Amino acid sequence: MTYIPTSPTERDAMLEIIGVKSLDDLFEDVPARHRFPMLNLPPALTEMEAMNELSGLAQANENVRNDLISFLGAGMYNHYIPSVVDHILRRGEFYTAYTPYQPEISQGTLQAIFEYQSLMATLTGMDVSNASHYDGATATAEAVNLAYAQFRGKRKKVVVSPTVNPQYRAVIRTYVQGMDLELVADNANADLDSQPDELTGLLDDNTSLLIVQYPDFFGRVYDYTKLIEAAHAKGALVCVVANPTALAMFKTPGSMGADIVVGDGQPLGIPMWYGGPSVGFFTTRKNFVHKMAGRLVGETVDNRGQRAYVLTLTAREQHIKRERATSNICTNQGLIALGTAVYLSLLGKKGLRQVAELCYQKAHYAAAQLSQIDGIGLCFTDPFFHEFALCVNRPVSEVNAHLLEHGILGGYDLGQDYPALKDHMLIAVTEMNSKEDIDMFVEVLSEVSHD
Amino acid sequence: MNAPANLKYTKSDEWFDPATGAMGISDYAQSQLSDIVFVEILVEEGDAVEAGKPIASVESVKASAEIYASAGGTISAVNKDLSNKPETLNSDPYGEGWMVKVDGGTAGEVMDSAAYEKYCEERAH
Amino acid sequence: MTDAVMEPKVKTTPKIVEPTLFDLSSPGRTGVTMPASDVPATALPPDDLLRSDLPLPELAEVDVVRHYIHLSKFNYSVDSGFYPLGSCTMKYNPKINEDTCRLPGFLHTHPLQPIETVQGNLVLMFTLQEWLKEIAGFAAVTLQPAAGAHGEFTGVLMMRAYHKSRGDTKRMKMLIPDAAHGTNPASVGMMGMSVVTIPSDERGNVDLKALEAACDHTVVGMMLTNPNTLGLFDENIEKVTELVHGCGGLMYGDGANLNALLGIVRPGDLGFDVMHFNLHKTFSVPHGGGGPGVGPVGVAAHLADFLPEPLVGIVEDGDEGTAPLYGFVKPTKSIGRMKAFHGHFGGGFVRSFTYIAMHGPDGLKDISQYAVLNANYLQARLRDTYKVPYDRICMHEFVAEGRFKGSNVRALDISKRLMDYNFHPPTNYFPLIVHEALMIEPTETENKDTLDAFAEAMIKIAEESKSQPELLHNAPSTTQFGRMDEVKAARELVLCCWLPDNYGSE
């Protein structure tokens, strides 16, 4: 079926006004030998048939709400999403609108983005936020673009901590292919026990940006204040990749002196959706605002004296600056950013802290229980939030296969990215994991390790 | 449209004052850009610039532009107040809105004010 | 010209139509209560690692719902009316897509789950790759890029990698027509390449003479939107691709205007080597107030090895009794990863899959035929009132001039006045090669009555521009909000609001 509302009579009347005889006559500019190809696609389905087919595909998956108990994180997390979030996202006024180019009839979207910017700046402890990027990884790559532009390409080194999410580091490597830049410390064989301050030795007058993660990929929480001071002493900028749930509880990167704080907003009320879409938040200091890519909403007044909002500083962007723009980014993740704003406004001051503390408590309970199993131990001793690296006494794939038989989605196999962490898995625990789930996980894992 | 007779002008709408070595953007340029909200001077004191090379980047509410050196020489002064008050480029492009000064400036391809005024009129059609 | 700039303005407190979340906050409220912890307590880390305050707003559930419902009423949307925003393909978004993409099996799967547990997702992705290949005539497709601009960046990276792999390192020039979207040159700028602008001829085609002169051994390729941003199909398209290929360059297709070509012609057949799709335009992923977009990229066989990793492929063949096992594969010379995980699966792939499945080959052709019919019908109804500078049969959109002889009414005024007639305005001031451009794209999902009502409003506005121009200059007057002070926004730069300093102290 199609959604075309035009009747054959109307079509013919329209063709007559245009002055052609048939629909096909509208396409004479298309080279005849390639015109009207027969597409080898399955025949059209009705709505009922389509719903059946899609339901079948969805049911062919094992999902973490009905089928599996999940301890998998590594960049995407299973959190509770209050009902209101999706009720708002299903409003056609929000999801069927486009970019608010006409502010008189887009104040809903504009004010919602302005509030999103405010919420993210509050959470990260920074001055300003943009309207969002595609995801945490691309937001991190945009931080590299900002620093590159800030130093007009004169500082050619970016120090990337090896404990930044491996996928984020991979995206940075892709993004800088056309830039005259060197990535330093982005090394899977680095000493992962070393403290972050040891990165200081790599910073020099040629460094434009230092990137660290908070908590780092292994869940560890460090105070980066000294490291940031050291970077600033060399004139470099610092970008902190942060988990937004952790920011409800831990000291903000803003208070540590960070210049840019980015991350993925998925934990804030967005379903995992097999990896996307999520939303990349990007916050910075006011003095970098002109070098920041992406859309920005600012407050103003309309000609009737009403407070209102508009897209501002648009001359920074690609449609005006073209090849001189900091980035080619055009869209933001509008609807997903709205989802995180609804989530944050529902949970608020108290609720978000509760979520963070539940994650912390449950993860620490799980870590304590798991590390009592013979042959299994925690890799690191530093403070952590809701993820931790666990050393197991056989290949992670074997352990996970066994867990899966018991309906448990085990941790991320760290050996894939870090050769030194063969037989190590990264466990994530959130408020969605009950004590019962954790106890079962411990029980099944002790069976495996004793086999 | 105002183009003081003591200045020289480029086709890309910058001016140069042979007497002081100052350069900036013309009244025509500021009016075309409209409300200027951001100025970034790309050179520093002591830098050697060539005529025709970028010295600044300017953004208005609706447009952006690269500003090119109207003369070559060694930068002797940079107008640091502009970044805080970019609107000066609109209100006083030939006075407080100067961007940089050069020592021993040799003008690039420039025209006098009469030729420049004619050039601006042609473009306004 | 800039007379008002320095005039001191009287400070007045603006009227607040809808308070912000921060204005609405009141100490002690919460919209959600989380359960108490069911595990033995662990001490929190030392205080110097913790934040002392979390100044987020505090609201009850009903406060939040009413706030967002109030905001939603300020928006114009496709669900509420005609949205002929050129180049954006604001077609109707079928409601079933909203249900299929929220099936729990899609919503609650983790991107790093073992492939055996997500065969439904992988079959869907594999099938969508196959369908997009077939629709546009390419050898391989990546679904990873997050939006059109991201797809462009992917495409340009691959073009660069292709030349580099052949030891052809001198190619640094990208040819881009003057009518192109700004993302095209910006994508090139991100790669440190240079842009050579190619003019359009008097029929709105690429100027072949200028193109020929620009084609040499330093050309990376050409980025071309076809139909172009004037809504015109390039009459010499095969000659264009021949010239670019002739100098060793590659043809990049900007798929923004694919809604005109479904079942009409396959860009791959015309000689395009690489193209991004905008699933949020052509295949009905809703625009979401500015995103997320979805920007898969298709390539001809000689570029397939350079695609981003990973792609979805068959990792174990099936036989009569068992289905094949779908998983991830890495192209041999991959440019790398464009984003974390696999792309915009839920919000993007599931909706587009549903849409393509429900249309089938004939339905897809109908989409493009009716999109083109509607645009030509509007063009025919308006061409006597508004100048159409490149006037010939158009594709899915056309560009008119929003200005009249002897009148100071501009395209912007016409657009604002359209709001008073309850229409969303067309795209303004783009493409740059048309004076006071009004770029109109009706899409296939509008009926004749709507198109007639829009045409009549446009004709009436043209009359008003002569009889009562002030109506246009002051428009809109019937909307909740009037024209904005954009200078104030940019100069004062208020980008965030916060809880008041004395919050909670009373």
Image (cartoon, helix red, strand yellow):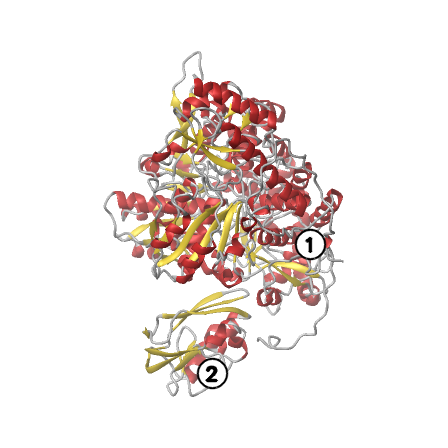
Q: Horizontally, is B119 left or right of C398 in the view?
A: left
Residue A360 at x, y percent in the picture: 57, 38
Quarter of the figure with residue C79: top right
Residue C278 at x, y percent in the picture: 50, 42
Q: Horizontally, is C400 left or right of C13 in the view?
A: left
Q: Quadrant of the C terminus of chain C?
A: bottom right
In depth, the one of A190 and C339 nearer the eye is: A190
Q: Nearer the viewer, mark 2 or mark 1?
A: 1
Residue located beneath label 2 in the image: B3
What amino acid does circle 1 point to?
Phe
In depth, the one of C256 and C286 nearer the eye is: C286
The residue located at (42%, 84%) in the rendering is B7
User: How far apart are the alpha carbons under marks 2 and 1?
Assistant: 50 Å
Residue located beneath label 1 in the image: C22
Disc 1 element: helix
Residue C133 at x, y percent in the picture: 42, 33
In depth, the one of C367 and A326 nearer the eye is: A326
From what the image shows, is residue A1 above or below residue B41? Answer: above
Q: Horizontally, is C171 left or right of C413 in the view?
A: left
Disc 2 element: loop
The residue located at (48%, 42%) in the rendering is C146
